[in-house]
Amino acid sequence: MMAERRRGTVRDLRRDNRSVLLWSLYFDQPRSRQDLSRTTGLSPASVSNVVRDLIDEGIVIEAGSVDSDGGRPRVLLRINPDHGYVVGVDVGETRVRVELFDLAMTERAKADYPLDPRERGVDVVVDRILAGLAAVLAGSGVGSSAVLGVGVGVPGVVEQGPEVLVHGQTFGWDAVPLERLLRAGTDLPLHIDNGAKTMGQAELWFGAGRGAQHAVVGLIGSGVGASIITRGSTHRGSTSSAGEWGHTTVMVGGRSCRCGSSGCLEAYVGAEAILDRYGRALPGDDQESALAALIEAAATSAAAAEVLDQTALYLGAGIADLINLFNPERIILGGWAGLLLGEKLLPAIREAARRHALRHPFAETSIELCRLGPDAVALGAATLPVEHLLNGTAASATRQNRSAG
């Protein structure tokens, strides 16, 4: 028993050392072995042992050298971008977007499928996802054995139990076993999460949230959601439904919301609600082009300008609630509609938030736009399998290729 326990302890220690080193290198590369020892606190011998294993497995490669003070040049290390590939899927309310990335998160292939509001049934979405997977593999020339995993960002609450279930009221989805349905068409590892949370992770890793310990990333599209970052990690709540910002009440007895309640923030600042409040025909055959036309029309139309002024007011009040509740360092607005609105209305949104928030926490919070653009949900979804690789809980592409061969 003691020998077994000791072996388990050593194995766990090696795995933990490997994970600490991979996380450090992934976000700050290229780095030398000496740099990694200093930043991780691991001994030079431990770093050398782990790096040797990672190089043997093809996860880490040498990337040149730098001169050291009076000694031999230091060899630089980096994650091998072609060790494996990851796929991110954004199931939005207007489209399904599928993107394939290497481990440097460079996009290698992309497929986009518009979604008609009347075509949000689970069968349609599953077909679009599977078609997108086939398209990006074919378009990139990457074999499925080299794919470490597929991350899928979806609207609604994702219940992570023995079977992954998606509760998406606005899609009419009630406990949809999305992972099981996708299994009919793919055997790739699947990781499913709420789309606002995947966008939040993308911003936390690569965008406007990088370095923040406390932030809120708001996703505004047809609907509204948020990712709450606490101590550098996503806050999920007891059943993973934390972040349903769009369904906080801004007007008791107000406009009907798609969730079945009334007066929700989403019923005032979601793209579908904004266009409905305007109530007039606009050019374009989808919500994105219609909202862009509404924003442009505000320069000459008093009615359009009034709708946007009201939107800035409600959105600012909603942000003030986040500031008062969570005291974040940063509020980051994203999503296709959030970016369109923010480019035009950010000063007015900030002013409305200032008027409705407590003075001290407002003064300590920046309000800014997502830096990663409308692809942030898919990029964030693709980080889910990367996270498993860094934690040491995913099979390497090398092992997958050997087993496939």
Image: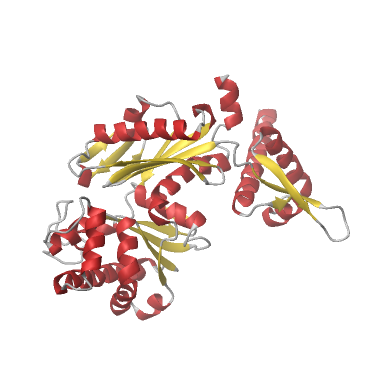
User: Above or below — where is 27 with respect to 135?
Assistant: below
Q: How is the image coloured?
A: secondary structure
Question: Residue 302, how many percent across, how many down?
Answer: 15, 74
Question: Residue 220, how many percent across, how many down?
Answer: 30, 58
Residue at 25% across / 42% down in the picture?
115
From this viewpoint, which residue is outermost toward the right?
70
**Which quadrant would the N terminus be assigned to in this image?**
top right
| Left or right of 219, for residue 115 | left
Front residue of 341 and 91: 341
| Left or right of 120, for residue 35 | right
Residue at 31% across / 74% down in the picture?
353
Residue at 34% across / 24% down in the picture?
184
From this viewpoint, which residue is outermost toward the top?
405
Residue 219 sits in quarter: bottom left
**Which quadrant would the C terminus be assigned to in this image?**
top right
Residue 358 sits in quarter: bottom left
| Left or right of 49, for residue 354 | left
User: Above or below — where is 306 with respect to 26?
Assistant: below
Front residue of 11 and 264: 264
Front residue of 222 and 23: 222
Question: Residue 53, how many percent across, how many down?
Answer: 71, 36
Residue 326 sits in quarter: bottom left
User: Above or below — where is 116 with respect to 245?
Assistant: above
| Left or right of 138, for residue 42 | right
Q: How many marks?
A: 0
Q: Is residue 236 visible?
A: no
Question: Residue 329, how many percent across, how many down?
Answer: 45, 69
Q: Is residue 307 visible?
A: yes
